[in-house]
Image (spheres, grey):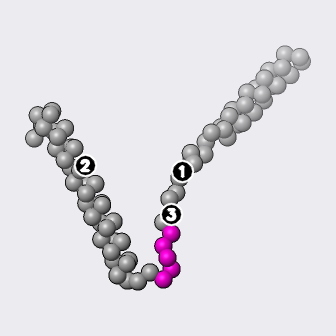
């Protein structure tokens, strides 16, 4: 009787530990969200200028990335 009780008790403890462990560190890590606040009375010209500036920055980053990949490709002798 004691052996059966201990066997059931150990099994229950193991199941509880698995259940508790599955809840630890399962959430996604916290992420930082950057929000740009704009003046509520911006003119359309200011909005278009901001969009053009952002697009130019995006194109600059893409060109730099292409240049870096091209440099790596040349170093490795790939075509």
Going from the N terminus, do you reach mark 1 or mark 2 first?
1
Magenta residue check for 38: yes
Quarter the C terminus occupies: top left
- Pointer 1: what residue? 31
Q: Which residue bears the numbered disc 2?
A: 65
Q: Tell me: residue 62, above or below residue 21.
A: below
Q: CA–CA distance between discs 1 and 2?
A: 25 Å
Q: How far apart are marks 3 and 2 (CA)?
A: 25 Å
Q: How crowded is mark 1: few (under 14 residues within 10 Å), some or many (20 or more)?
A: few
Above or below: residue 21 compared with residue 7: below
Q: Position of residue 29 (x, y in %)?
A: 56, 45
Q: Which residue is drawn at 11% across and 34% down?
A: 77
Residue 70 quadrant: top left
Q: 20 and 32: which one is in front?
A: 32
| The N terminus lies in quadrant | top right
The magenta segment: 37-41
Tell me: 63 left or right of 29: left
Residue 32 lies in the magenta-colored region: no
- Specify the quadrant of the image occupied by residue 18: top right
**Dominant SS in magenta:** loop
Instruction: Name the residue rendered at 25%, 57% in the picture.
Output: 60
Q: Distance between the residues labelled 1 and 3?
A: 13 Å
Q: Is mark 3 on a helix, strand or loop?
A: loop
């Amino acid at each position: 009787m004691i052996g059966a009780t201990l066997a059931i008790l150990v099994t229950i403890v193991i199941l509880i530990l698995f259940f508790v462990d599955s809840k630890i560190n399962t959430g996604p890590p916290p992420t930082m969200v950057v929000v740009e606040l704009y003046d509520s009375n911006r003119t359309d010209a200011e909005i278009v200028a901001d969009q053009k500036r952002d697009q130019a920055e995006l194109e600059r980053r893409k060109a730099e990335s292409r240049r870096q990949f091209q440099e790596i490709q040349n170093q490795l002798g790939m075509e």
